[in-house]
Amino acid sequence: MSDGSSFYITTPIFYVNDVPHIGHAYTEVASDVLARWHRQAGDDTWFLTGTDEHGQKILRTATANGVSPKEWADRLVATAWQPLLATIDISNDDFIRTTDERHEKNVQLFLQRLFDAGYIYTGDYEGFYCVGCEEYKQPTDLVDGTGQYEGVQVCAIHSKPVELLQERNYFFRMSDFTDRLLDLYESNPEFIQPESVRNEIVAFVRRGLHDLSISRQSFDWGIKVPWDDTHVVYVWFDALLNYITAAGYGSDDARFEELWPATHIVGKDIARFHAVIWPAMLMAAGLAVPKQVFGHGWLLVGGEKMSKSKLTGIAPNQITDTFGSDAFRYYFMSAITFGQDGSFSWEDLSARYQSELANGFGNLASRVIAMVIKYVDGRVPDAGTLTDAEEGLRALERSVVAEADAAIERLAIQDALTSIWQLVDQLNGYITVQEPWKLSKNPEDRARLETVLATVVHGVGTLAVLLSPVIPEATTKLWQALGGVGDVADVPIRQADDWQGVGRVETLAPLFPRVETIEGAA
């Protein structure tokens, strides 16, 4: 992708039946890092997130809490979901709610167009329905229950019994798109990633698709079917459309044309909705399919997927209140290979905070600033004659910039950080070998001292630019201390090694203070 390209990225819109946990925050942070990187690269970037507020699960939760579904959604969005974005420093450009008028109106428009084109018909359906997933389940999606549910079939994801439902509904002719979807997957192998998720979905579609029930009569919390107000739109059919209703579909054609298609970041458990149902819907409407669907792995706690119902959900602020938002962001982006399952532990978080952030990057930044203040009165010196050591570091800066950008292009955030951390380690090693504290004691070594200091200041500035999308708070402080020109987030990231400073540094407080206790790590 060249500078100036368009990059539209989305998270799933999250159910408001409960408060967010770190599994939700993980998806938000990954999407945010990608959005920040592309913005800093000069790409025309737009980042969407939001909440899914219709459906039977929300209705039941609201009823259990003695309020209307809209009151429940308003409360959860205001007190939990939007505050989450501030807690973990998310830079979204828009926040859509499926109860927004702009969404509801254009869901009906989309549905009417499919109905008029003959893609929707009336039929009877009977099947096993999981309210937690808001999805009819195939027999292969069910497992034998254990404990209180022993002897009954339960959803493999939620471990709760499914319900046998029989309804007369409207159906979308999704079976018409089996071959077109398989052609899409074959012609564009990057459309679904990672490979494990792609293989699973291709195998699923090859077995043949059934038509999709897209309305409900048994409850009324949802968007009304435009030609039959006794039905509400199936929650997934409603929710998936947020990606285009927020982008201007039906309301601003020029904006929609500019933004669409999008890269969707989703959990692997909902990749099938996004890579099968969603492109089929778009094909039926004559619209472009998404650019890509990336199904990342699950966060595991004690070997199980993060879940409020299983009491394994951890609130993001349990981490950020102690370690800060930057450490939260860095940990989940560096400790887990994006696209694979990853296990969270307080011990690993604490160890990485100390070794990689406090002792590695943070200490490097503090040492460099302190040495420039102590040895050359805060003035950033010019480099003199460069030895192989300095030439090697400059070459490493250039290669790290290229490697990290290439990794981001393939959504390999961990690989990008691994590349960047080569520079952290090499700069720390360079300081150890060059011993500027010794050079400072001999006037004859003054030129050499200035070359060493100029080299490490330049390297640390490059790190500030490269790490800005991941740890924006710390890099903003470091950039100011380095005397960087403008805002670090405005420095072109694909030319991170060509940054400019005013020539003086300022005192820098520790970027990652030592943490003695871990709050909430029961």
Image (cartoon, rainbow, N blue to C red):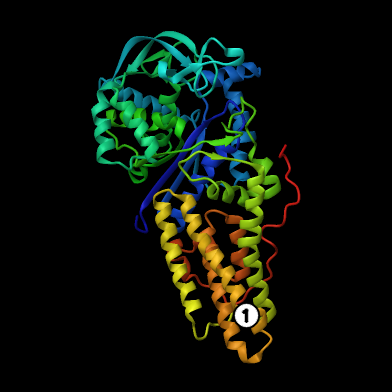
Q: Is residue 388 visible?
A: yes
In the rendered structure, the answer to whether residue 321 lies left or right of residue 452 reads right
Q: Is residue 487 visible?
A: no
Of helix, strand and loop, which one carries label 1? loop
Quarter of the image where the C terminus is located: top right
Quarter of the image where the N terminus is located: bottom left
Q: Which residue is pictured at 70% across the width and 45% down the height? A: 321
Residue extending farthest to the bottom is 444
Q: Position of residue 23 (x, y in %)?
A: 56, 37
Q: Which residue is pictured at 63% across the width and 79% down the height? A: 436
Q: Is residue 21 above or below residue 452?
A: above
> Viewer-proximal residue, 100 or 181?
181
Number of residue marks: 1
Q: Position of residue 292 (x, y in %)?
A: 36, 41
> Viewer-proximal residue, 242 or 425?
425
Residue type at mark 1? Arg
Circle 1 Cα neighbour tier, 10 Å, few/some/many (<14 / 14–19 / ≥20):
some
Q: Is residue 256 above or below residue 280?
A: below
> Viewer-proximal residue, 142 or 466?
142
Q: Position of residue 12 (x, y in %)?
A: 47, 35
> Viewer-proximal residue, 226 or 146?
146
Q: Which residue is pictured at 61% across the width and 76% down the height? A: 504
The residue where tag 1 is placed is 379
Q: Position of residue 383 (x, y in %)?
A: 53, 82
Q: Is residue 280 above or below residue 473?
A: above
